[in-house]
Amino acid sequence: MCVTEVKRQARAERTRASLLRGAREVFEERGFLDAKISEICDRAGVAYGSFYTHFADKDAVFAELIDEMLRGLLTVMRAEALNGDGPEARIARANRAYLRAYEKSARLMAVFEQVATFSPAMRETYLRAWGVFYDRQERAIRGWQEAGLVPADIDPRTAAVALATMIGRTAYTWFVLGRPHEDGDVDQLTRLYCRAIGI
Amino acid sequence: MCVTEVKRQARAERTRASLLRGAREVFEERGFLDAKISEICDRAGVAYGSFYTHFADKDAVFAELIDEMLRGLLTVMRAEALNGDGPEARIARANRAYLRAYEKSARLMAVFEQVATFSPAMRETYLRAWGVFYDRQERAIRGWQEAGLVPADIDPRTAAVALATMIGRTAYTWFVLGRPHEDGDVDQLTRLYCRAIGI
Amino acid sequence: MCVTEVKRQARAERTRASLLRGAREVFEERGFLDAKISEICDRAGVAYGSFYTHFADKDAVFAELIDEMLRGLLTVMRAEALNGDGPEARIARANRAYLRAYEKSARLMAVFEQVATFSPAMRETYLRAWGVFYDRQERAIRGWQEAGLVPADIDPRTAAVALATMIGRTAYTWFVLGRPHEDGDVDQLTRLYCRAIGI
Amino acid sequence: MCVTEVKRQARAERTRASLLRGAREVFEERGFLDAKISEICDRAGVAYGSFYTHFADKDAVFAELIDEMLRGLLTVMRAEALNGDGPEARIARANRAYLRAYEKSARLMAVFEQVATFSPAMRETYLRAWGVFYDRQERAIRGWQEAGLVPADIDPRTAAVALATMIGRTAYTWFVLGRPHEDGDVDQLTRLYCRAIGI
DNA sequence: AATGAATGAGTGTTCATTCAT
DNA sequence: AATGAATGAACACTCATTCAT
């Protein structure tokens, strides 16, 4: 692997990155269905055929964008989890972190939800991603329950799923559907979350 | 208006009804995007072109099916609301009623959510429908708050929106995405709902 | 089935016929691979999409043209067979009839041979068609053999296949590849055919 | 021309040979139309773009493979011709030799026939190759005729063309189209050939 | 010579909608 | 009202060939 090869790879990598950038723009502006490969290439400043040098098809770029986005989201959430205060503070921080992260990717999230609606593969990804969030919250609730902070009549799994759903769908409602909301609403959500599990 | 005319209208009405039936079947089986007018007509036992005698376009039949479905859902929810027990019982009944009604229409609901994802008009309908549910729950919570059953630090609107979202999206998760759930889960949901607003 | 319906069908039938005519022209001029649906429609004076009202795809029109052609060829050959003279006269007549019929369809035959070369379905048709000719000649030779006109050391099947191949491929060579030939050559072919089987 | 240059040339020669090998494989497996340059390079273990260092285009490699094959075939046939027995023995040997040689190259022959069907250049090659065979057989028949072994009413050219066609197309039928045949069939073919020219 | 990324022309097919009867 | 043939716009994907290193 000489310098030339690295250069070649570097060029390819740049093209690929341009395409990803272009694809993200187009998907965000038009949604998956109205996104045209030709426009993606135009945005990337790349010839039409080059798209297929780097991606198998339209689904493939999209999947890659979504994977990247979900990895980022997970990273953010994991970073949050490290600090260990009381449950209420952790829930508050987690909710804020999630909503902030969601907002940043809101336009791509919108398309993700759209595609999950008709593509079996993307639905899989969607369910898997939610599974991860459910698990994290379930573990936390179970821990608090074992510590005596959460009543015994709460089923950690059901609560985790329901409350994660509440937070997650609220993010969609606010940032995708554009329902108006204020900053204090996050605190209200956290309060509802905490009270729901008896904290 | 002679007998022939009446007959004609009756015949037209029957054709229209057949088309609605056929459309529902096809939308439910294939989703909006893969539903073909030709298949709708086949199912309805009606000639290809007759579709446009009764509906302006594909969106129009769909909108009509959705309106019908939402009207039905609202009727069910209204019927529930009449009986007046304590808040917990009312919430329990409302949740059960909603989930049962949702399940019945789950396949069309799935398509509704799909279309709301890319059709501005259907998104409007979607938001309006949720608005109605939010309002109902907000009014209830506000009432309980005024009656001293719900703490003052709960914002009725935010709580209504968040908890309706929780219930609504849980229905989607269960009946559209097919997440496994048991009968007792409804009670857990109700418990979370009630505790969240301090009941 | 009222008059109107017949008229409708008649119009469709006309469109279909135009498309078949256009397709034949284009296939003959360009071969299968370079034949474009759009040009077929242009020739037929019909809108692009109308092609698919009448044919499933490019292969389908082609198959229909070939079937029609082969039916015609078989009809001609069957008509020849009726007259019953001596073997030599019959062979002469059959050869002449075949070559004349082949010449008439030479340009489509060329495309048939082409497509049989890469399309499994068309290869099937090709083999089936030859099978019919082989069988006819085998029966004839076997009959003459039983009548003592053909020596016993001739295997009717092998002879039929080989000699039908000779005639058939000569037709291709003359009328598709354009090898020069004179009228008397048919008599030479017949002489070779007859002598080959000992007549 | 220094050592390095020689090495370079040797390397280039090896690459070229690999590409020819790869091309033959791919053409035989997929036919001309579905053969992809990329797959040829993969088989050859050579980089994608290197193909064009050695061949002008897809047609060029193919032409080279066909030339090689035809040269081989001709060599075999020439070797046969040397031994001089009676006509029947010579015809028998030639037929056997041809069929054996054809069978060995059958898969490439199939593609040759395919391409001759749509490529004017390859059709030229095809006609030229047949011309050589016709000529050889014509010369032989003419010789036998002059020696009084073949009747005067046989036209050597027409007979040569027709009978070479019979043998050649039988080879195609057997080894490309896969029509079943037994070993004794060759003798039948030879018998038909001989009788046809009055031997 | 070798590499492999970049290029972009080319087309069959689908299907919602229109319209003549 | 009903029929069903006609319409035509729209678009992803392939792959031979070029070209910068």
Image (cartoon, coloured by chain):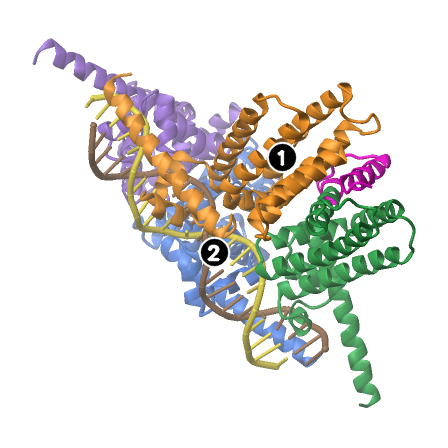
Chain colours: A blue, B purple, C orange, D green, E brown, F yellow
Say whether residue A56 is left or right of residue E1. Answer: left
Q: Residue at x 79, y 40 (%)?
A: D198
Q: Residue furthest top?
A: B3
The image shows residue B128, relative to residue D74, as above or below, that is above
- For disc 1, the chain is C
| Image-based side of A69 in relation to D157, left or right | left
State yes or no: residue B128 in magenta: no
Q: Amino acid at mark 2?
A: Ala
Residue D190: which quarter of the image?
A: top right
**Quadrant in the picture for the N terminus of chain B:** top left
The kind of secondary structure the magenta stretch mainly shows is helix
Is residue D41 left or right of E10 when viewed as pictured? right
**In this picture, which residue range is highlighted in magenta?**
D171-199
Q: Which mark is residue C198?
A: none
Give the residue number, with chain letter if any, for mark 1: C124
**Is D191 in the magenta?**
yes
Residue B183 position within the rendered picture, expressed as x and y whole percent measured from the top left: 51, 23
- Which of the numbered marks, if any, corresponds to residue A97? 2
Per the image, label 2 sits on a secondary structure element best described as helix
Distance from the alpha carbon under mark 2 to that under mark 1: 66 Å
Tag 1 secondary structure: helix
Which of the pair C131/C3 is nearer the observer?
Answer: C131
